[in-house]
Amino acid sequence: MKNYDVCIIGAGASGSLASILLAQKGFSVCVLDKFEKPAKKLLVTGNGKCNITNKNLSSEFYNQNIDIFLNQFDYQDTIKLFKSFGLDIYADEEGRCYPISNSAKSVQTILINQMQKNNVNFLPNTQVYDIKKNKNSYNIFCDNNALTCNNIIFACGLNDFSITMLKNFEIKTKKILPSLCALKTQQNTKILNGVRVSNVQVTANCDNLIMVQNGEVLFKDNGLSGICIFNLSALFAKNKRFEGKICINLLKNYSKTQIFKMISEKLYIFEDMQMLLESMFDPKVAKYILAESKINQETKYIDNQKINAIVDNIVNLQFNVTDCYNNNQVFSGGVDLSELTQDLQSKTYKGMYFCGEICDVDGICGGYNLQWAWTSANIVAKNLQKN
Ligand SMILES: Cc1cc2nc3c(=O)[nH]c(=O)nc-3n(C[C@H](O)[C@H](O)[C@H](O)COP(=O)(O)OP(=O)(O)OC[C@H]3O[C@@H](n4cnc5c(N)ncnc54)[C@H](O)[C@@H]3O)c2cc1C
């Protein structure tokens, strides 16, 4: 069996970077991945643009305080490191950082280039199915191969394989749930399917934990999507329960009094309530508001009580969350950080490290999850010593 200083399971974001940094330090490194090329998943990130990090980096955008890690390798270190690999990065007005090509392919290319340049052994199309610990080494069993190594890095994300391995090694995990995903609602939103509302304020309430986001919501057949909703799904994932409320304020820049006045004045202009509300909202949203307010679309005049009912729905359109869709960008949960040392090594198994999504660290949309992949890969690579 071929022996390596380090074997890395998974050549995704964190595994690819860790392999480069360790090879640069002189370790013999082997990375195994079931895909043909490293960093395949990166190609779909950031809508194909790869939101690589964020200039507004802080633990508040993660499920727990990870300052101790971010202080060691933050967004500036990411930008500097990738620049040294030949990748130029820009930040948009909200701090989200992308390659100047606006193409995730550039990020994959520079990682592959560095892996080749530093003689990383990459084993493509290699599915790992078991790992065994010996006294001072690990055996890795794949479809058509078996390897040994002194150190092993789990960089394979959260899936059936990693969950089985964590169970076998009796490593304590936090409950694994989808995060950054669309939400299913009790209300039937079929008539709104495909409609986007912009510049809205969305509030999530899960067991009295509140989170607020501003931006855009996309209605689905039976639920809600869009970046705001993806971010709010993290609150439900953190609370380990996809049940609660979502409230949308469709006119966040106006007070209830202003909206009341606006509608009252329009009563004398429009032929019916549907037309009146279409002057303020998408026709399908107008129809939905009227239905929720129990007002017929063709009604011409309404009393103050009915105007108030409409105003309430405009500023507080309520949806009961019943579940999540499985279009999640990340999983919450995974290896409990209390199981790991500050260099992300298992406290129980010497030479066993974890980086990326397999750890119980997840952030909201905006480059935070990839930043964790880069930070954790860097910490593992910096601290891993020759046995
Ligand atoms: C659609 C989408 C868009 C996203 N956009 C962004 C974004 O713009 N910005 C951001 O910060 N985050 C984004 N994310 C999240 C980000 O992609 C992940 O947080 C990040 O890729 C996790 O890195 P990782 O190294 O832990 O795992 P991954 O990048 O998932 O890599 C894991 C690797 O392990 C391999 N593997 C798994 N099991 C085995 C096995 N048994 N044998 C061999 N190989 C195995 C897989 O093939 C894979 O290549 C997005 C995610 C999705 C799905």
Image (cartoon, helix red, strand yellow):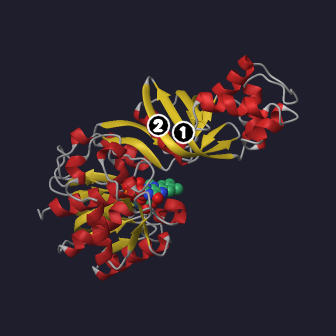
Front-most of residues 156 and 129: 156
Which residue is identified by label 2?
212
Question: What x and y, as percent, mark residue 61?
Answer: 36, 45
Residue at (49, 50) in percent of width and height: 329
Q: Secondary structure at mark 1?
A: strand
Question: What x and y, as percent, mark residue 18?
Answer: 28, 65
Give the side of residue 63 with respect to residue 260, left or right. Answer: left
Residue type at tag 2: Val
Residue at (48, 73) in percent of width and height: 105
Front-most of residues 149 and 27: 27
Q: Quadrant of the N terminus?
A: bottom left
Note whether residue 257 is visible.
yes
Give the side of residue 256 with respect to residue 86, left or right. Answer: right
Question: What x and y, as percent, mark residue 189?
Answer: 71, 35
Residue type at tag 1: Gln
Q: Is mark 1 within 8 Å of ligand 1?
A: no
- Discs 1, 2 touching: Cβ within 8 Å: yes
Q: Is mark 2 within 8 Å of ligand 1?
A: no
Which residue is identified by label 1?
201
